[in-house]
Image (cartoon, rainbow, N blue to C red):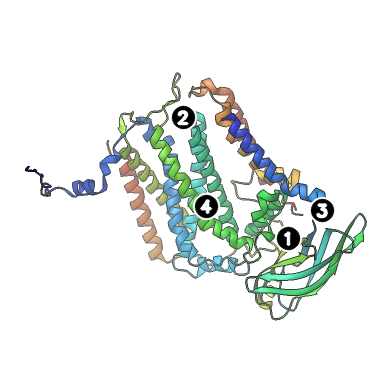
Amino acid sequence: MKTIFFRTLLIVLLLSLIPASITLAHGEPTIIVEPAVVSPGEQITIIGADMEDGEVFKITLESGSGTAQLGEAIAIKDGEEAGFTAVFSIPNNLTAGFYLLRATTDEGETTAADLTIVSSTDLANAMTMDASAAQHTLDRSKPPSLIGSVIVLALLSASLGVWLIRKPE
Amino acid sequence: MKTNISPTPPAQQGTFKEWLVERTGWKGLTYPVPTHANKIWYLLGGISFVGFLILFATGIYMAQFYNAQPSDAHQSAVFLITGVPLGDLIRSIHFWTAQIVTVTVVLHLLRILYSGSFKRPRELNWYIGLGLLFVTLGAVYTGSVLKYDQEGLEALQHSKEAGELMGALGAFFTSEFSSTASLLTRLFTTHVSILPMAFAALIGVHIYLINQHGISPKATLDATARKTKGEGESRFDIHLRRMIGYGLILLAVVMSLALLLPAPIGQHGMPGAEVTKPWWMFVWLFPAEAALGVRALIIMPSILGGLLLLVPVVDRSPYLNPVKRKWVLIVAGIILLILIIGGLVAVIQPTTDHLG
């Protein structure tokens, strides 16, 4: 049993190391997109990092309905590593939904980030709010008939439960 | 040669109970179980099971109105409360049942640990039980994300970052896993299909193994672990009746809580912000996250999970009584205390930015 346990542990540890070995060998590019929620026609800024100097990344937006090309970005050396900051406009013909923003090189290196496209009205509503831990203030009052029914059902359920527990063997 | 074939005797006029017993084999559930199996501490697993049935019923209803697209998820959750008949009540019953089931599952685990019920020949069932704990916490986590308010969005962003740190093991939580379904959509699928299927498979094996080994002996001073199938002064149908009884009380409690304290929902989530704290079952992670960053979400559960996996390996004596296993229980008690203190510290700790 001890052997099985330690073998399993070893397999899990090896699995978790797989991408680490890739990172050590080649370096793995990453991108951040800001803002993560936009509406069609607006601009996004993509910041790429951990890239090689001169690498050309094709930027695309992928969804279930297809792929839209946004353009290209070239990584430029800045300090020890290369990266880019590129601004793109979201095409007006894209529908609201979830998209995967992908940056790919001709060599097959790829990285991605989430982008949500919403209608301009929804975005305007969202922009007027700050991030808040506060709860929604919704009208959650219930009709007296519903309250009464739930109370009766709860009492019946509890009574039946107590009867089943206390019933002699 | 003459063969005599006895005809089936004509059906006797009997009570409805006799009719039911003949057709369902109900008498097959009257096998012996020990009397202590009918105490509430030995019924916590059964109570959790009834809780899961409530969760399935209410979850199926809610799934008819939920939209798992990031752009519409929060609005559909709000609509469930304000526009769907019984939506607020059903959602609140689901919420409170999830809270209580988490408590009963954890108490069940602690009872097993305390009474040594994981010992030979029940080690495998301990691991199945850990799988069920993982499914329970996974369902709580994915469920907390689905409402997609600030709290849910932050939970999702944390899992994304933790997934990226976990490499191949965390690939599911990264954006690149699927270009056609967002992580929120995939977490919804996990919540409503993958985890319930895993639960069904694991609980099936869990119940089968309990049936094969019998209820573990009472942890008296000299009691040792052994198979007890077929032993006992009580009957399983009585055990089952009490389990249903407590289950009905649970239903009454969650209905009452749903009326008095409807399930909370926060404001629409703003990406990138960190202004909330995790739910109470994960809040003990908060101080560790403040110290170690998002990697604490991998390190701390891994340590805790590893320790739970080690329990049957470390505590191998045949004795069940806590007095004869005090070092294991002292260590377990200290760990539990650390988790509780971690949770209390998290309550007074200010929210800080941990996301990269």
Marks 2 and 4, how far apart in space?
Answer: 27 Å
Q: Is disc 2 placed on a helix, strand or loop?
A: loop
Q: Are marks 2 and 4 in contact (CB under 8 Å)?
A: no
Marks 2 and 3, how far apart in space?
Answer: 49 Å
Marks 4 and 3, how far apart in space?
Answer: 35 Å
**Mark 2 neighbour class, 10 Å CA radius: few under 14, some 14 to 19, many 20 or more:** some
Q: Which residue is mark 4?
A: B195
- The x and y percentages for residue B58 are 45, 58
Q: Is disc 1 placed on a helix, strand or loop?
A: loop
Marks 1 and 2, how far apart in space?
Answer: 49 Å
Closer to the chain start, of discs 1 and 2, is: 2
The mark lying in front, picked from 2 and 4, is 2
Q: Which residue is mark 1?
A: B272
Asked which quadrant contains residue A44, the reply is bottom right
Closer to the chain start, of discs 4 and 1, is: 4
**In the depicted view, which residue is nearer to us: B219 or B336?**
B219
Q: Which residue is mark 2?
A: B121
Q: Are marks 2 and 4 on the same chain?
A: yes
Q: Are marks 4 and 3 in contact (CB under 8 Å)?
A: no
